[in-house]
Every structure is written in C-alpha cells, then in structure tokens.
Amino acid sequence: MSSLPHDNVILFPKTVEYYQYELTRLLEAERYSDAMQLLVFLLGCQTDDNTAREEWQSLLDWMRMMFPDLTAVQLAEDDEEDSEEGLLRHHLHAKGESSGAYAERLLETIRTQQAPDKLLLALDQLAFLEHDGIDAALTGWLHEEELHPLIQFKTLQTLKKRGVAGSVTLHRNGESIVCDIEDTPADFDRFPSQIQEIIARVQEISEIKHPALSYFAAQTWNEFLAYIYGTSAYRQMLRQEEACVDVWAAALHLTLLERVFEGGDKEELLELYGITSALIFQWEQAYRIMQQFASAVFGRTV
C-alpha cells in the first residue's frame, strides 16, 4: 500500500462497489490482516457514500476487537515475531494442530475441495506443519492436476517455505512449464527488481491521475504475477529492455481503469507512459495478456 497520504482520494460509486467486492473476497478467504489494511485505506479516502463509510468503520472496530493480535501486527510490521506468519505458527502450536492428523485433514481438503478460498487457507497452514507426507502430496498435486494459476503459485510458495528443493512440471495458461521450487519468490517483494519497477511506475502515475487506484494496483499486480509466473510471457518480461517497464505499467493501468471505473482514455495513458509507435506492438501484446488475466481471475466487470 502506498505510504503517501490519501485523504485527497475521492471514491466514486463504481470504485466503492469494486472495493466492496474486494473486501468481501478478503473476508471470505479469511485474510483478515489484508482486510483491515484495506478498511484503513478506505476510511482515509473521501466518499459521498456515508452508509458504506459507516459499515467500514463498524467492521474495522469489530475486527480490531476480535483480532487484537492482527492490530498489533499493523503497528509493528517489521517485527518478525509479530508477522502474520508468526501469528499463524503460534496459532497452530497453541491449538495443538501441528499433529499428523490435522495435516492429513488439510491434505484431504486439498484433494477434495474446489473453492479457491478454502484451498488458499489450507496451503497457508500446510506451510508450517510437520508431516512426512506434505511435500510429496503437494508436489504430486501440482504435477498431476491442472490447477488455477493462483493456486499453483501459492502451492509453489508453500513448498518453498517448507524448504523443498528441485523442480516440478506443471500446466499453466496452455503451457507445460518447469518451475524450480527454490527460485519461487516467497513474497511478492522478492520478485526481481525490473518486476518491482513496473508496479512502482503505475503507482507513481496513478497517485497523480487516478489516486483511488493506488491500493488496488498493488493487489492486482500481485495476482497478475501469480497468474503469469513461470510462463513464456513472464520470462520475456524479465528479458525486456528498460522501456518495457512503461509498456507493462500502461497495460496494467488501463486494465484497472476498465475494471474499476467506466473506462480509461487509452491515448492519454499511452502519452503519459511515453508509449511511442516503436513500442505500440509490445504494448498491445502486454495488454492482451493483461486482459486474459482479468477475465480468468476476476471473471466479472463492475
């Protein structure tokens, strides 16, 4: 989330609707820390929807009361012992859920559950449990099942956190790709610098032209990286010249405007990002991939 003040950010009705959808998604996935951060962001913005503001404040007050440990995390984000992962480790240990039986129940969830939110929650917990069968089960699941790209990436991250090494072949976006588990970024801020520069560029421009997009740009970019990781498009992104930072940034920015607002001015954005005629073909390729991602992940427009 941007650290810049956002009390001058105005949330329009379509933007409020989209953030409500994002908030619901976070709560359904039990990503309470992320939900609290989003609520803090929204309450710092301006909106004429007083009903929504009252609901956000009530929900934030309730969550702070119910999850005081997560409130402490937000106040001390750099303290590893107070990190969300640390809290999860503590939670599992305190409830005696590091047993083999609990691990087996989570693996059964992986094998039978279709809901992405339930799968993500199970993977979060499997990263910190001790059980001989977890590594082989997750590796086999990746190789044998054609999973949603976001679930695939989360599984790779889980294996990485568990200290698993080696490669795994999986099917992603119509490709058969080989991923080295140990090279998987454990967190989104561990992606290569040229990847980080793309989202930094979007946030730089959006703070000026479309400040309400600043928070959602980071969330969407993280999901896009999970969607594209390991594919030929991702490898191409890593090899591209510095000018292509603006190519991908402009493609993401326009996609966000189309999803959050009524649409964006394509020509204005291309000019803002310095997309010349020499770069337009690369921009169209990046924009097409971004549209495929938006259709696969969001599946709905607002």
Image (spheres, rainbow, N blue to C red):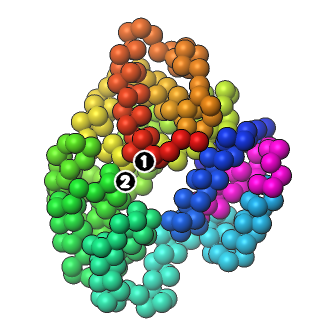
Look at the picture and state if 238 lies above or below 159. Answer: above
Q: Quadrant of residue 12?
A: top right
The C terminus appears in which quarter of the rendering?
Answer: top right
> What's the residue at 58%, 65% (across, down)?
27
Does 171 appear in magenta? no
Q: Secondary structure at mark 1?
A: helix
> Would you say the residues marked 2 and 1 are in contact, meaning their CB atoms lie under 8 Å apart?
yes
> What's the residue at 52%, 75% (across, down)?
87
Does 41 appear in magenta? yes
Query: Where is residue 199 shown, x and y percent of the image?
Result: 50, 36
Which is nearer the eye, 21 or 89? 21
Query: Where is residue 32 shown, x and y percent of the image?
Result: 58, 67
Look at the picture and state if 204 lies above or below 108. Answer: above
Q: Quadrant of residue 102?
A: bottom left
Judge whether residue 245 can be spotted in this image: no
Judge whether residue 259 can be spotted in this image: yes
Query: On the image, numbered disc 2 is attached to which residue?
Result: 150
Q: Amino acid at mark 1?
A: Val
Mark 1 Cα-neighbour bin, 10 Å: few <14, some 14–19, many ≥20: some
